[in-house]
Every structure is written in structure tokens, then in C-alpha cells.
Image: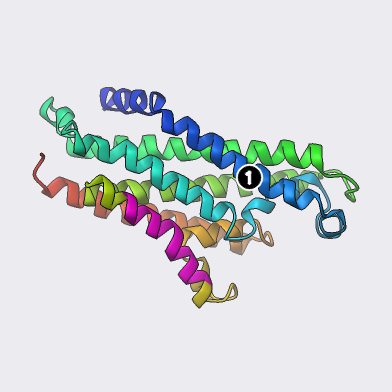
Amino acid sequence: MLNVLRADFYKLRHLKSFYVIIVLTAFFDFVILSDLSFYPDSYQSTYDNFLQIAFYPFSVWQFMPLVIPLALGILICLLVTNDFSYGTMKDPVTLGHSRFNVFFSKCLVSGIAAIVILLACILVSLFTSILMFYGLNSDPSFRDIAQFGIRTLLEIGLSVAFAVLFTAIAFIIRHTAIVMAIHFSVALFVTMIISSVFLPSSPIFYAWLGNAMAKVSGAFSIEMVGIILAVIVIYLLVSILFGYGVFAKRDMK
């Protein structure tokens, strides 16, 4: 298992697209916050401190809840389907590693890549909100800091769930072009359709990972945390069961 993980981490570290995606995703976060900074009357009346502003890019589903899944879709397609395209996915199995270890390793590496991308965006949000926003009502309290930490952990969980979902899709479909198209469709059109059909007051609205990302930056409550945790766990379990189930039964090529 450790050897498979080392090999997958090596591929991730040497994948130039990974670093390009980190920079571009963080740049989108910066652009969204920079635009808000030009409207002091708006943010001064809405937010009390910079920690609250830092989650503004995640508050609207058209912003980071759309950008991050698109970024993950591209990255994971390249990370997983290349092994199928080059015929190297069978190599660790040939060497005696179980298919579950191969599948779980890809999920783990994809999840860590998602965490890195998410944390890069959060750091950019923090620095931008500190440097570019003024005239706020107060400094962050202990409650604000705790809520910021919990929101960050929830966004990390949702990002990892997205990564595992996309990894499962890649293992099921295998073909690079088709996987890329499906990842784009899932990241973009599913979020758009659900947001257009259902109102934010509907529970179904937040049953999708992208919309759940937006809910995290909304009103903080124990109920919200519980809903998000349930969404994360359900998507992780379903993705792993289906992804591994299909991979375990198919012939290796």
C-alpha cells in the first residue's frame, strides 16, 4: 500500500498541471474578493470582520463552489485516466497489490490534492481580506475564529468528497476525453440545474456538493454542520462503493 501511495504522490508532485490549477483557482478567489473591495458601503454593512469576508467567495454557488469542482475535475482526470490510457494502471496489481489499495491510493492522493487547492484559496482569502478591506466594525472574536475553523474543515470535507466522486467516475469511465466531459458536466451543469430548479430554502438544494459549499458560508448553526457532515459522508461512501465495485469486477487492460 505504501509503495502505491508513494508512486501516486510522485505523479502528483511532478504533474505540472497541479501547480497551474492551484495558482489559477487561488487567482479566481482573489479576483472575487478584489471586486468586492470596491464596494465599501456593501461589505461594511454586511460583514463585521475580515474572517467573515474571507468566506465571501464561497457564499455564492457561481463563485468558488463552481470553480473548485471544475479545477478538481481537470486535475483528477489527468491524474487517474492517464494510467488507463498508458496501460500503467495494471502495473501495481501485477506486482501483487490489491485493487482496493490501488483505488484507495488514488482517492487519497486526489483528496490531498483537493485539500491543497482549498487551503490555497482560504489563505488567499485571508490575506486579501486583511489587506484590502477597511472600516469593519470589529476584530474577530473567539467565536468568529472557531466558526472560521469549522467552516474551513467543512469546506475541506466537501472538496475531498468532490475529489473522491471524480476519482470514482474516472475509474468507471476510464477514457480521458469522456471523463473530462463528464467531470465538466457534473461540476458545471448539475450545480446550475439544481440551483435553477430548487430554491435555497429547499433541502434538495444543498444535497449537491457544490451547493453545500455555499451553505457553509451562510448562517452558522449546529443544524448546518450536521447537514454538511451528512452530505460529505454519503457522497464519500457512495463514491467509494460504486467506484471500487466497478474497478474490482473489470478486466485490467
* Left or right of 169 in this view: 133: right
Q: Is residue 117 magenta?
A: no
Q: How many marks?
A: 1
Residue bearing the label numbered 1 = 29
Amino acid tagged 1? Asp
Q: Is residue 234 visible?
A: no
Q: Position of residue 196 (x, y in %)?
A: 52, 74
Res. 225 visible in picture: yes
Image position of 11 (left or right of 124): left
Please state the horizontal and vertical placement of residue 39, each as a whole percent of the image: 82, 55
Residue 106 falls left or right of residue 142: left
| Residue 190 forms part of the magenta stretch | yes
What segment is highlighted magenta in the picture? 180-195
From the image, give the main secondary structure of the stretch colored magenta: helix
Report which quarter residue 30 is drawn in.
top right
Q: Is residue 157 left or right of residue 123?
A: left
Instruction: Tell me residue 132's x, y (percent).
Output: 80, 41
Position of residue 235 relative to residue 21, above or below, is below
- Residues packed near mark 1 inside 10 Å, few (<14), some (14 to 19) or many (20 plus): many
Q: Quadrant of the C terminus?
A: top left
Frontmost residue, 175 versus 54: 175
**Which residue appears at 60% of the width and 45% of the height?**
28
- Residue 26 in which image quadrant: top right
Instruction: Give me the residue at 39% from left, 38% from top.
Output: 110
* Frontmost residue, 38 versus 63: 38
Q: Is residue 35 above or below residue 196?
A: above
